[in-house]
Amino acid sequence: MAQLAETYACAPSTERGRGILISGDTKSNSILYCNGRSVIFRYLDRPLEVKVYGEHAYPATVARYSPNGEWIASADVSGTVRIWGTHNDFVLKKEFRVLTGRIDDLQWSPDGQRIVASGEGKGKSLVRAFMWDSGTNVGEFDGHSRRVLSCAFKPTRPFRIVTCGEDFLVNFYEGPPFKFKLSHRNHLNFVNCVRFSPDGSKFITVGSDKKGLIYDAKSGEKIGELSSEDGHSGSIYAVSWSSDSKQVLTVSADKSAKIWDISEDGNGKVKKTLTCPGSGGVDDMLVGCLWQNDYLVTVSLGGTIFLYSANDLDTKPLELSGHMKNVNSLAVLKSDPKVILSSSYDGLIVKWIQGIGYCGRLERKVNSQIKCFAAVEQEIVSSGFDNKIWRVSLHEDQCGDADCIDIGSQPKDLSLAILSPDLALVSIETGVVLLRGAKVLSTTNLGFPVTACTIIPDGTEAIVGGQDGRLHVYSIIGDTLKEEAVLEKHRGPITVIRYSPDVSMFASADANREAVVWDRTSREVKLNNMLYHTARINCLTWSPANNMVATGSLDTCVIIYEVNKPASSRITVKGAHLGGVYGLEFTDEYSVVSSGEDAFVRLWRLTPQ
């Protein structure tokens, strides 16, 4: 059996020049955000506890709890809204096609009976309000000509709806059934977010013109604005009210968050400015915020979530982060507690500590893309989508100097000789390249298309896999490769080859969903019929005691085989990662860590059968 022990969550999807609208539930103290097709629940008081909803067919954009906390409405880029329960397996209640384009914001009515959604669409259909159980329209929303970025439902009767968007307008509707009442054009640029105060007396709009305007909730008339003295110097992307309706939190492209005191007459003065504890780059722009219970949550463009305590704003915020894109490789360092390094193809390397979670990002001097990645205690070796191999020294949490080696062809796979890690083998389309440190020892043309390679820990032997499914075993003498044997068993291009830790065996896997374990001395098949995946195998790893092999595949599954038992007595983890598994490593004898397309890293505990 395999049990999910820890989940290291992904970061929220962000987009340059746009805000993201995160939401939460005050009772369970959780927040919701989206990444790819997943909706992610994070608990503010228990950061390691994560739940994921992955039933959307398209990338999800926004999700909100109903007022009673029992249901969640989530929307995606196709204009679909799904309504599902928060308990027992997220059972689907209803699914409606609401708009013809992307939905940017949605809100529940305070009685939980109606939902209003806004976004992009053809013609007039930029905003729709509907009954949550039947999907029937409850009003006509005219008056917008471009994408509607945000909408809000007045939390007290009489009900009102306010919408704002890229046409610089703020529209006010009365109902139900809702009909157009009045429109304001006080903003000089995109209006990014609108929110009613929890007591239902006012609402505020913020925009890319650095202004925040406050209106009366019942009549829709403008009553005041946020003071420009000590105000934001960049676009304001999001706003959130405190629970007592006396303060608001705003975040901006100027990399700061501000808390404002809102007076009775509707004007706002800055009470405190919170600056982002980052390096000051573009990734530190703040694009989302939420004021929930005693927590202030801000989200940066780089995907980092900062948690401040509302009672003690001077303490350093807790940082939660992760990957935004496909995590394509993992490395586990031999330390105590175990350190896991994960890399995604956008060039981000994140450090996790088993049992603790997020421990920071490794900032390289040159942030290049990453396709292949290997790490030992003191060094990271990576290659991207150009012809370069990067060797970066590693000191605690910092990356030191980087050496760059141009090998003249795009690297397909790379492998380090663990006992002498300055020796590396890199496969290219036509053959392999041997590296020692930052020098190319030799480039060997092997005469067949190469797809995967591995080098033995002491650096005396290599195995190269080809497009034709054959494994070629080479001995390495100095800087030359001498072919020793050709092994045939696979029926598809080889995707991955790995030696066991004691080098008595090696395992290989192919794009035709088969894995094979070989005995190294006799070069005979030791375990076959490992045919339980339904798509290409992307990754493979050995347990430290050499008795288990784990494979991860495009079919979203991880399968763990015991070498001394038939392949049919396997352990399968179904749906380990939405979209496919791309990285896999054992951290100890009974713990395996996996990563995948959904930008998550997960740790599984095995109980042998």
Image (tube, rainbow, N blue to C red):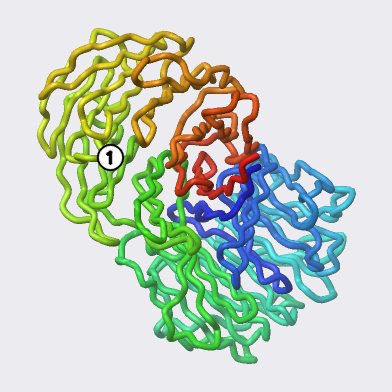
Please tell me whether residue 10 is drawn above or below residue 421 in the rendered image. Answer: below
Q: Is disc 1 surrounded by few (<14), some (14 to 19) or many (20+) residues within 10 Å? A: many
Please tell me whether residue 549 is drawn above or below residue 445 in the rendered image. Answer: below
Q: Amino acid at mark 1?
A: Ser
Left or right placement of residue 136 versus residue 122 in this view: right
Q: Secondary structure at mark 1?
A: strand
Residue 36 position in % (x across, y down): 56, 44
The number of numbered discs placed on residues in the rendered structure image is 1
Residue that numbered label 1 is attached to: 382
Left or right placement of residue 127 versus residue 60 in this view: right
Q: Residue at x 57, y 80 (%)?
A: 248
Residue 375 position in % (x across, y down): 30, 45
Left or right placement of residue 484 versus residue 285 in this view: left
Which residue appears farthest toward the bottom when viewing the image?
Answer: 264
Residue 206 position in % (x across, y down): 54, 69
Residue 313 position in % (x across, y down): 47, 85
Q: Residue at x 63, y 35 (%)?
A: 572
Q: Quadrant of the N terminus?
A: top right
Whether residue 317 is visible here, answered yes or no, is yes
Residue 280: quarter of image = bottom left
Please tell me whether residue 438 is drawn above or below residue 10 in the rendered image. Answer: above
